[in-house]
Image (cartoon, coloured by chain):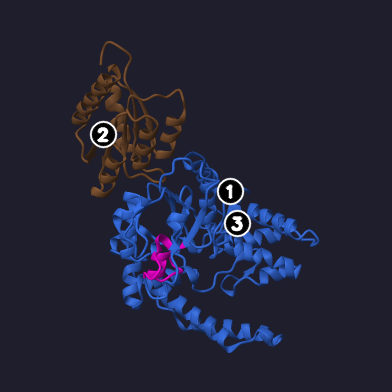
Amino acid sequence: MANMNKKETAKGGKGPQPLIGISRNILKIKDLVSHIADTGLNILVSGETGVGKEVVAQNLYFGSNRKNKPFLKVNCAALPEGLLESELYGHERGAFTGAERKKRGKFELAHGGVLFLDEIGDMSLPLQSKLLHVLQSGVFSPLGSEKELRADTWVIAATNHNLEEEIFEKKFREDLYYRLNTIKIHIDPLRERKEDIPLLIDYYLNQYELRYPSKKIIRPSQSIIRELIAYPWPGNVRELQNVLKRILVTDSWEEVLQGLPKLHQIGNNRVVPSPSTVITPDRPGPEQFATLLDGIFSHLEKESQDFSSFSLKDIKRKAVDRVEREVISYVLHKTNWNRTKASKILQISYKTLLYKISDLSIKPPQRASQNLF
Amino acid sequence: MGECMPQKLLIIEDNEEVLISLYNYFIAKGFDVTSASNGLDALKLLESEQENFDLIITDLIMPSVSGVGIIAIVKKKSPHTPIIAITGWGEHPEALAKEARADIVLEKPVELADLESLVNELLSLSKDQQKK
């Protein structure tokens, strides 16, 4: 599973990307999808970035009697509030500066079909209120218009946020949450369903073979597959897809493995965690900073053979990432992973902290040493 | 009750302890009880043609398919099947349950004897409706 690159998908026709996996989580999702796709009830799909929330939405859509109607997607995090409102509900000509023409909103355009609201957790509170009203009443007004429009639009929302936590912090409306959450589908991160990795590898390589028939794709050996299984995949299925694509260019699985981020460098068929993957029980000591410097110098030595990708900016970013990782891990450990408290200590917003935890692949202690092999 | 076939109840509750106590209570009272520990299992029971429940008791807050989802699905298919929703979680799901046309919404804690009399009341009401 992975997100499709298309921003919007037009009407029916070909089927969705299949839900791939044999893990309990994926089997349960397939079972759920087959029983609820036709109910038209609001659905909330949750899971980390890159797990394939849109693929689940597509499967719901194709399993429903709306499959010949539109499937439209709006990313609620990608647009500022005003634009998002106009994107969803449309606007009249002259409704605001720059609105030179009348525009129909996605709610209206998706009539009879599906509106996939991605990153719903990033929607502002005023827009959450408006969405709640639309879901309750089924009617909405385009910006600058007094007339009310009615649309039969099936809303499937997705988020990588913990909305329960955000309700507690008054960042997400509880009533909207319950309305969207009539049915909830949670997709586990790939590191928690490693048994799906070989199937996903197989599926994507088959896809590439179909797409590039003249290209002979080398299949990974069992030991390479074991190494790919051992990697924790912080970017989930999307990262796996991107890594697999490299084989089209490099023709060497060893090279593909070497290209995996340094923090998770693999050797001897297992993950070698960086000092901070194992959550530091106490304040980072000098050895950790020595490791940090070691890492930077080994990076420099490696790059010095080929200066084409050498950049001080890049080194700075990597160093900052590692320092941030150490500090955030330390504070999370000290606060028992209370992210609200940790964000206050670090003087960053809760949202930024969540983003950094995910971006820097910081894992809670029990997951740090998780390894199936 | 009494003269004819026992009434068929479906009880949906994700808390095992609560489910067992409801199950045992209504079995002891002579009902034909089927239980489901989550919304998806309940949905499968409801989809199977053989099962035709006289009344459904459902929890509202459950993972994957919520009680609100179950109520909406049942009422779409068979609007006359009486449903009692039980919630322990404040007003929002409660309002949604009413909107989805649950016949009665109760807040935990619920006295089993009170629940039983509500069940009997709804069952006799739905019998009257059927006769009409």
Q: Mark 3 points at which residue?
A: A373
Q: Mark 2 lies on which chain?
A: B
Secondary structure under the numbered disc 3 in the rendered image: loop
- Tag 1 or tag 3, which sits nearer the N-term? 1
Residue found at x 44% / y 40%: A39
Q: How many marks?
A: 3
| Viewer-nearest residue: B101 or B48 | B101
View extreme (top): residue? B3
Callout 3 environment at 10 Å: few (<14), some (14 to 19), or many (20+)? Answer: few
Q: The residue under label 1 is which amino acid type?
A: Gly
| Viewer-nearest residue: A337 or B1 | B1
Callout 2 environment at 10 Å: few (<14), some (14 to 19), or many (20+)? Answer: some
- State which chain is coloured brown: B
| Viewer-nearest residue: A49 or A143 | A143
Q: Colour of chain A?
A: blue
Which stretch is magenta?
A: A75-95
Callout 1 environment at 10 Å: few (<14), some (14 to 19), or many (20+)? Answer: some
- In the image, residue A331 lies in the stretch drawn in magenta: no
On the question of residue A46 being in view, the answer is: no
Coordinates of residue A84 in the picture (x, y in percent):
41, 66
Secondary structure under the numbered disc 2 in the rendered image: loop
Q: The residue under label 2 is which amino acid type?
A: Asp
Q: Mark 1 points at which residue?
A: A12
* Quarter of the figure with residue B64: top left
Q: Mark 2 points at which residue?
A: B103
Coordinates of residue A305 in the picture (x, y in percent):
71, 86
Q: Relative to A274, is A315 above or below? A: below
Coordinates of residue A153 in the picture (x, y in percent):
43, 50
Secondary structure under the numbered disc 1 in the rendered image: loop
Which numbered disc covers residue A283? none
Q: In this view, does A68 lie to the left or right of A46?
A: right
Judged by depth in the image, the label closer to the viewer, 3 or 1, is 1
